[in-house]
Image: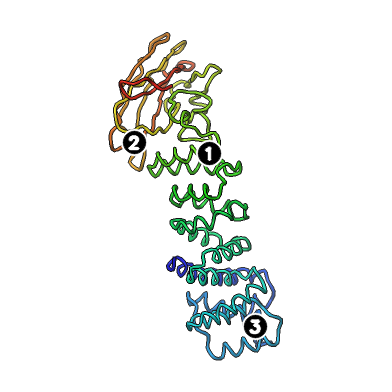
Amino acid sequence: MRIFGRILLLAAFVVVAGLATRDAIAGAFARRAPALTLQVDPYHARALAAKLDSRVTKAGTPAQLTDADLASIRTALRRNPLVPELVRTLGVDPGLRGKDTDARALITLASSISRREVFSQLWLIEDAVHRNKIDEALVHYDVALSVSEPIQPLLVKVLTGALSERDIRNAVAPYLAAKRPWRGTFLSFAVANGKPREVAETLVVARVVDDPALRSLQTDLLSWFVARDDVAGAQQHALRMPGGNAARFATMGFTPETVDPVFQPLTWLLTNNSEIEAALDSDNRLQILASPSQQGAAAMRVMHLPAGRYDITQRVTFTGAQPAYAQWEAHCTGARADKFWDQSIPVRSGTATQRFSLAVPARCNGVRLILNIGAVEGQEGSSMTIDDLKVAPTGTSARD
């Protein structure tokens, strides 16, 4: 936690100082041209703050103020209304000299003058973390994230990394439940860059798993679970989501429940484009149509199948123009995604029930099933129908 806070402060000081310089372009003349303003009024508060911020930006790190700097700041504060940036600058100096109590008092004053003085919030985060006051740190996180969009990328990155700490997950949860304005930005980053189990646990603690506004984000989370080869974790979280139930994920066949896009990739993704079209009909049969000369995946899905042997059965119907080929294949999930099984589907006119054997190797944490089809060149299109698709460990009853 100590390292987490310190990295935040040193990185943020330069960022915030840079933001102040950037925002000055659209601000008052004192912020746009502090040197010129100070020639006219050596104790202009905002110009002096801009000058000192610019020094930090160029140096890349905060440094102790000189006696002349301190004298100018004190004079400027006596002559002008309180300017939060200048009070904050005055407060940072005793902090660099090890006088944290003095620094805390001044920077808290700067924060009370204006919550939008972002660096004050960042310093107070670091200070709270140093004192192991996690709830206090999150109060200032909330303020900084709420008032400054430009600082959000830095803060959500640090906060996402901190989710490895249970105390942090518990402290963040109430803010997610309260739908704070930065919730979407934070969760989008956390889902794509954090550890899926930590993000999922945070959602559970916050009791927002059933929030309709987070439905698509949780679908993304399931995909990231699978991408990180944690299919068991994906299924565990999916069971917590509204509509999640064990039968949905154990059933291999094509039903409205097993093609629900909310739970992809744990449910079937059906191809629907100008080349290949796959759709479920009213009798829960998968109808597939491939345009002339086209080939590719018609359906794919990830299932949690422990290592072992399985029997797959299906009923296949070919009517009209038949495809050149149809084929099942299976890959392990994860970075390698290596194919370990393929099975051609005999193409014969009429309806037939077929049985295949699938051996899942121990190296697979999850299985990605893909149904491929290839159309014959020159004809209007190729079609096939699959239904009554089931899987079961060899020697047991099949699961639809």
Do the numbered discs 3 and 1 sit on residues whose CB atoms are within 8 Å? Answer: no
* Type of amino acid under label 1: Met
* Type of amino acid under label 2: Cys
Residue 256 on image: x %, y %:
53, 25
Q: Which residue is mark 1?
A: 241
Query: Are there few (<14), some (14-19), or many (20+) residues within 10 Å of tag 1?
Result: many
* Residue occupying image coordinates x 40% and y 17%: 314
Quadrant position of the N terminus in the picture: bottom left
Query: Are there few (<14), some (14-19), or many (20+) residues within 10 Å of tag 2?
Result: many
Dot placed on the residue nearer the N-terminal end, 3 or 1: 3
Residue 333 on image: x %, y %:
36, 38
Q: Nearer the viewer, mark 3 or mark 1?
A: 1
Quarter of the image holding residue 165? Answer: bottom left
Quarter of the image holding residue 301? Answer: top left
Helix, strand or loop for disc 2? strand
Q: Nearer the viewer, mark 2 or mark 1?
A: 1
User: Rounded to the nearest whole Å, what is the CA distance between mark 3 and mark 1?
Assistant: 60 Å
Residue at the top extreme? 350
